[in-house]
Image (cartoon, rainbow, N blue to C red):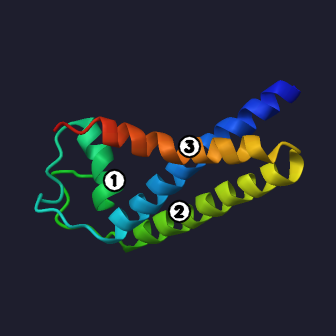
Amino acid sequence: MKLLRRLHLYLGCFFAPLLLFYVGSGWYQTLRIDRAKNVGEADTWVAKITSVHKDQIWPTESAMSYSTQAFKVLVVLMSIALILSVLTGIYLAFRTLRRKWMLWGSLLLGLAMPVLILWLSQKR
C-alpha cells in the first residue's frame, strides 16, 4: 500500500505541471475562441467532442443557434476546482514526505519533459 501511495504521489507531481497547463489553456480556449472555423461543422464524433471543448456546443444540424454562457461558467468552475485540487495535492505531498528532493525532482521533470519533447519534435 505504501508503494502504491508513493507511486501515486510521484506520478501526480510529475503530471501536475502539464495538467495545470492544459486546464489553464482549456480555460483560456473556452473564453477566447479565435478560429475562422464555422461553429457546428463537426461531422465525426471526435470532432463533436472537440467542439464541446472548443465551442461549448454539441454540434447538430437541427439547432438554429447556441447559448454557451452556462457551459462556460461550468468550465471555469471546473478549471478553478482542478487547479486548487492539484495545488492541494502538491502541498500535501510536501507535508507528508521527508525526501523533498524527490518531489522537487518529480515536479521539475514534469515541467521539463513536455518542454523537451516539444523542442525535440521541431523540424528544422
3 or 2: mark nearer the eye: 3
Please indicate, yes or no, whether residue 11 appears anywhere in the rendered image: yes
Q: Amino acid at mark 1?
A: Val
Q: Which mark is residue 52?
A: 1
Give the quarter of the figure containing the N terminus: top right
What residue would you read off at disc 3?
110
Q: Quadrant of residue 34?
A: bottom left
**Label 1, label 2: how far apart the Cα atoms are:** 15 Å
Q: Which mark is residue 79?
A: 2
Ranked by sequence position, the earlier of labels 1 and 2 is 1
| Whether residue 52 is situated above or below residue 71 in the rendered picture | above
Which one is in front, 15 or 30? 15
**Label 1, label 3: how far apart the Cα atoms are:** 28 Å
Q: Which mark is residue 93?
A: none
Left or right: where does residue 47 sit relative to residue 116?
A: left
**Residue 122 at x, y percent in the picture:** 24, 39
Q: How many numbered discs, if any?
A: 3
Ranked by sequence position, the earlier of labels 3 and 2 is 2
Q: Amino acid at mark 2?
A: Ser
Q: Secondary structure at mark 2?
A: helix
1 or 2: mark nearer the eye: 2
**Residue 120 at x, y percent in the picture:** 32, 36
For mark 3, does the 10 Å Cα neighbourhood hold few (<14), some (14 to 19), or many (20 or more) residues?
many
